[in-house]
Every structure is written in structure tokens, then in C-alpha cells.
Amino acid sequence: MTAEHGPILLGQRVPGQAVMEELMAVQSVVRPRTWLQRVFGTSPLSPEAQPWYKGALGEIAVGRILEQLGPDWLVLHAIPVGRGSSDIDHLLVGPAGVFTVNTKNHSGQPVWVANRTLMVAGKKTRHLYNADFEASRASKLLTAAVGGAVDVTAMVVVVDPKSMTIKSRPDRVVVLRDGQLLGWLRHRKSELGPADVGRIASAAVLAQTWHRKPGPAGDPEGLQQSFIALRLLVHQALRRRAAWALGVPVAGLLMLANAGHLAAAILQSLGGR
């Protein structure tokens, strides 16, 4: 923060911003596909970029759900926290309390939860530990900024899993599918009055509350446009692979890729930004 420019505010950061920044950095060193690779539908994503791409899709999906909470809630995305490049996927401040939301895109994979264990396709993860740590850190930082105790609830939201089995619910972390998130929040009883929500929200929106040396806000709109363009290429490659698998000739395959309509659909899925 400088006297000239004033405090750095987080309200303009978009869902998945930190992940998209990493994705674009990784993709910037990837060689463009050859003509033949494009014809046969080779993905434009490098192997290193694929997890970042999937993560961005998950955070964008959850961000669209959170847009529906309404004016009583402050919703922040991709909050830089600590000293390095860590971030909080989503932070919610509203009548039901304060929540950190850790989004995990496990599309098409089975998820199993019991007490302190969350497994994806039979493999243990650190999702619960990380979410609990994230909420504890958020509580300490907000408490220091506000000057009074701020309780923060940890959440893990799993996007589009094949199945989700909860044998026993974790004590310290709420685990939900993305489709359950909005209803769960709306049915929570009120914990904070308008004055408390406003006080906590005023601290939460300041970048210096979270990070020792907060950087510039960046260019969220330009980043989104770059992601939309990349997503379009990924979809086109997928369609071409599918067409080849069905035995469609190259000429017919190229006619299938209606880039204009697909780009418009993607823009709409991101909220038209």
C-alpha cells in the first residue's frame, strides 16, 4: 500500500484468479501445436498445465454459485495470504458467519470421507488438514485486523464428483458437493448482525489484512479473456478427437468447430466478464 495509490482492495479479484495466473505462466513456455497436431485434436495444454486448468474450472464453477448469495454477503476470491504465493480460494462473510472455501475439482472421481480422512479414487488427500489450517490462519488474521475474536469455519467443496460417500462427518471441516453449497449456506442460522458483518467485511477486503507485502491487483479481465481463449482451444481439440474417434472426415470435422457459438457459451459460463 502506498499513500499515493491507497489501500489495495480484493473485491475485484475473480474466481480462480491465482490458479489462472499459474496456468498462464506454465502455458507461456509451451510450444504451439503443429498443424497436424491441431487437426488430430492434440490438447493445447501441457501435462504441467492440466491440473491448473482443472483447478481453475472448479473455482469458476463455485464462484458462479456464490454469486447467488445476495447483497447480505461479502464474497472474495483468490485471496493472496501469508508471505508467498498461497491463496484462499473463496472467503465468505455474511449473517451465517465467516467461511473459507477450499474448492477441489474431482470431476468424475469417487470421493470418500470419514472423520479425518478424505480419499479421492481410493487415495488419501490432505484436503481436510489444509482446509482446517486455512480457516485457522484466516481467523487469526481477521481477529488481529478487527481487534476482536473472529471465528472462521473451514469448508471443502468438491466439484462434480462421480460419487461422494460420507461415513462420518469431520469435526472441524464442512465437506459438501458443489450442488449442496448454496442451500447449506442459506439454511444456516444467523450468527452475525449487520454491524458485525460490516466490521469484518471492511477488514477482509483489504489486501494487507492477509499478506505481508500485497502485490498489485493485476488485470483480472485480461486474465479471464486469456483463459477463455485457451478454454476454447481445449474444447475444439476435444471435439476433434471425438470426431476422429467416430470416423468423421477431416473436412466434416473442421466444420463441426463453431468457434463463435462456443466462445459465447464460455463467456456466458464465466458471467459475461
Image: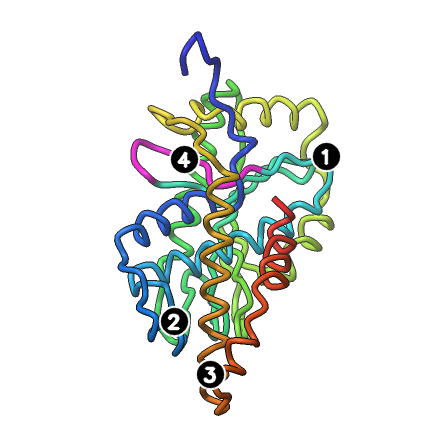
Pointer 4 residue: 80
Pointer 2 residue: 38
Q: Residues within 10 Å of mark 4 (few under 14, many from 20)?
A: many
User: Which residue is drawn at the image coordinates 47% and 51% (left, top)?
Assistant: 227
What amino acid type should be assigned to the residue bearing mark 2? Arg
Helix, strand, or loop for circle 2? helix
**Earlier sequence position, callout 1 versus callout 3:** 1
Q: Position of residue 253 (x, y in %)?
A: 51, 80
Instruction: Look at the picture and state if 142 lies above or below 30.
Output: above
Q: Is residue 175 magenta?
A: no
Pointer 3 residue: 250
**Earlier sequence position, callout 1 versus callout 4:** 1
In the picture, the quarter occupied by the C terminus is top right
Instruction: Look at the picture and state if 235 lies above or below 137.
Output: below
Q: Does the CB distance between marks 2 and 4 fall below 8 Å? A: no
**Residue 235 or 127: which is nearer the viewer?**
235
In the image: residue 198, left or right of residue 159: right
Residue 101: which disc?
Answer: none
Q: Nearer the viewer, mark 1 or mark 3?
A: 3
What amino acid type should be assigned to the residue bearing mark 1? Asp
Q: Gap in Å between the C-alphas at discs 3 and 2?
A: 11 Å
Q: Gap in Å between the C-alphas at discs 3 and 4?
A: 46 Å
Q: Gap in Å between the C-alphas at discs 1 and 4?
A: 24 Å
User: Which residue is drawn at the image coordinates 68% and 53% (left, top)?
Assistant: 182
User: Which residue is drawn at the image coordinates 65% and 28% (left, top)?
Assistant: 197
What segment carries the magenta color? 76-85
Pointer 1 residue: 72
Q: Does the CB distance between marks 3 and 2 fall below 8 Å? A: no
What amino acid type should be assigned to the residue bearing mark 4? Pro
Helix, strand, or loop for circle 3? helix
What amino acid type should be assigned to the residue bearing mark 3? Val
Q: Gap in Å between the C-alphas at discs 1 and 3?
A: 53 Å
